[in-house]
Image: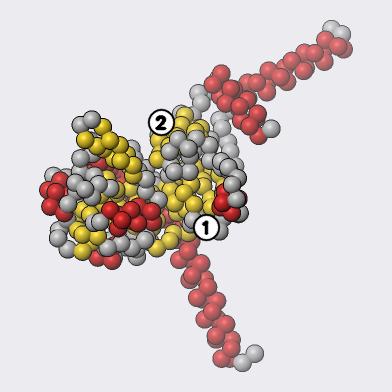
């Protein structure tokens, strides 16, 4: 076996190991919070005519990974943020325990509605591999 | 440093430790709720409406109790019957401590929901439930204070009202602690009410 073949085998084995880890290792995260913040000065910017969308129409969460919606109002005035009215400096932490689609009336969106789609924890294997790839892309 | 000053410093330290412990206990209790939690909690906006029992309805009436505040209308065919049935079930499951819970249901349809109609409607779920109605501008102010959405939708057969379906949880001290989105079962309400009663 040549030195080149040995290197290729080593690289291949390492890649396979990494893929196996990504497909089988349970999800471990530092925080399960999916944070959205209203920055200070948002109201003033809106009053000046800026069209600012802070909260998307649809939020996707995954049980066991990022299943807590955390909304924080850093602005100087109360803000309707998703389904709730949040005071300046206040936060709202909403945990999800059941995979489903949750629809909330929301005046902050043009559609008047906000959806939170909560997916079940990804199964070990292909599903978990895909979830890790998406998570990596999101972080990048 | 004199003994008086030392004693004062000691008292301040004890007070600060006590305050920190109280805050930690409150935060820990709030962290365990099934509902979405407000941090820090604010005083629940007060209102004065006509109660379905004929008396003035305000939150001050229920200090010391946990209040579950819902918004809806008696002609609602989808969300309200489910929410009220779940809340009635939760109160039943709480047993003897159920009397420390008060359900308040504020109408988003003052045109059709008078006190008598609300009393009759709510009694079909639980006779202790209290409804609140009033002038359209009074109710609009209450909705605005709580961030509630209500839009009249006219149809050939009459009209309906699209409205926020969440339930607010107010603790015994009148603080707006949490919001339970539509879809949670009676067990989750029982869990949270018990936690809030423990403070």
Check disc 2 and report its element: helix, strand or loop: strand
Q: Judge the density around disc 1: few (<14), some (14-19), many (≥20) Cα neighbours within 10 Å.
A: some
Residue drawn at x 68%, y 21% as measured from the top left? A17
Question: What percent of the width, then of the height, locates residue B133?
Answer: 23, 54
Q: Nearer the viewer, residue B151 or A29?
A: B151
Question: What percent of the width, then of the height, locates residue B142?
Answer: 33, 56
The chain that hosts pointer 1 is A
Q: Nearer the viewer, residue B183 or A66?
A: B183
Q: Earlier in the sequence, mark 2 or mark 1?
A: 1
Residue drawn at x 21%, y 35% as measured from the top left? B158
The chain that hosts pointer 2 is A
Question: What percent of the width, then of the height, locates residue A107?
Answer: 44, 43
Q: Can residue B38 be seen at all in this image of the molecule?
A: yes
Q: Nearer the viewer, residue A61 or A8?
A: A61
Task: Give the answer, above or below, for where B64 lies relative to B75.
Answer: below
Question: What percent of the width, then of the height, locates residue B13?
Answer: 55, 76
């Amino acid at each position: 076996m040549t030195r080149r073949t040995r290197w290729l085998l080593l690289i291949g084995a390492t890649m396979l190991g990494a893929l196996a880890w990504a497909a089988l290792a349970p999800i471990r995260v530092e925080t399960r919070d999916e944070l959205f913040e209203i920055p200070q000065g948002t109201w003033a910017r809106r009053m000046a005519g800026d069209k600012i969308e802070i909260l998307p129409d649809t939020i996707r969460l995954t049980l066991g990974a990022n299943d807590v919606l955390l909304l924080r109002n850093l602005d100087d005035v109360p803000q309707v943020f998703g389904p709730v009215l949040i005071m300046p400096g206040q936060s709202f932490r909403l945990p999800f325990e059941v995979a489903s689609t949750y629809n909330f009336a929301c005046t902050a969106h043009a559609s008047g509605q906000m959806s939170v789609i909560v997916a079940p924890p990804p199964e070990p294997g292909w599903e978990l591999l895909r979830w890790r790839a998406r998570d990596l892309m999101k972080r990048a | 440093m004199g003994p008086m000053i030392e004693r004062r410093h000691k008292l301040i330290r004890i007070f600060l430790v006590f305050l920190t412990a109280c805050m930690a206990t409150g935060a820990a209790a709030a962290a365990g709720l099934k509902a979405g939690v407000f941090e820090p909690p604010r005083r629940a906006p007060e209102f004065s409406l006509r109660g379905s029992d004929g008396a003035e309805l305000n939150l001050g009436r229920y200090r010391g109790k946990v209040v579950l505040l819902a918004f809806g209308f008696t002609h609602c065919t989808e969300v309200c019957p489910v929410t009220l049935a779940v809340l009635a079930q939760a109160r039943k499951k709480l047993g003897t401590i159920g009397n420390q819970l008060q359900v308040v249901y504020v109408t988003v349809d003052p045109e059709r929901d008078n006190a008598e109609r609300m009393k009759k409607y709510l009694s079909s779920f639980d006779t202790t439930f209290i409804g609140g109605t009033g002038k359209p501008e009074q109710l609009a102010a209450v909705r605005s204070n709580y961030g509630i959405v209500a839009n009249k939708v006219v149809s050939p057969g009459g009209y309906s009202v699209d409205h926020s379906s969440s339930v607010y949880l107010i603790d015994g001290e009148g603080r707006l602690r949490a919001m339970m989105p539509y879809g949670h079962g009676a067990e989750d309400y029982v869990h949270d009410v018990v936690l809030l009663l423990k403070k």
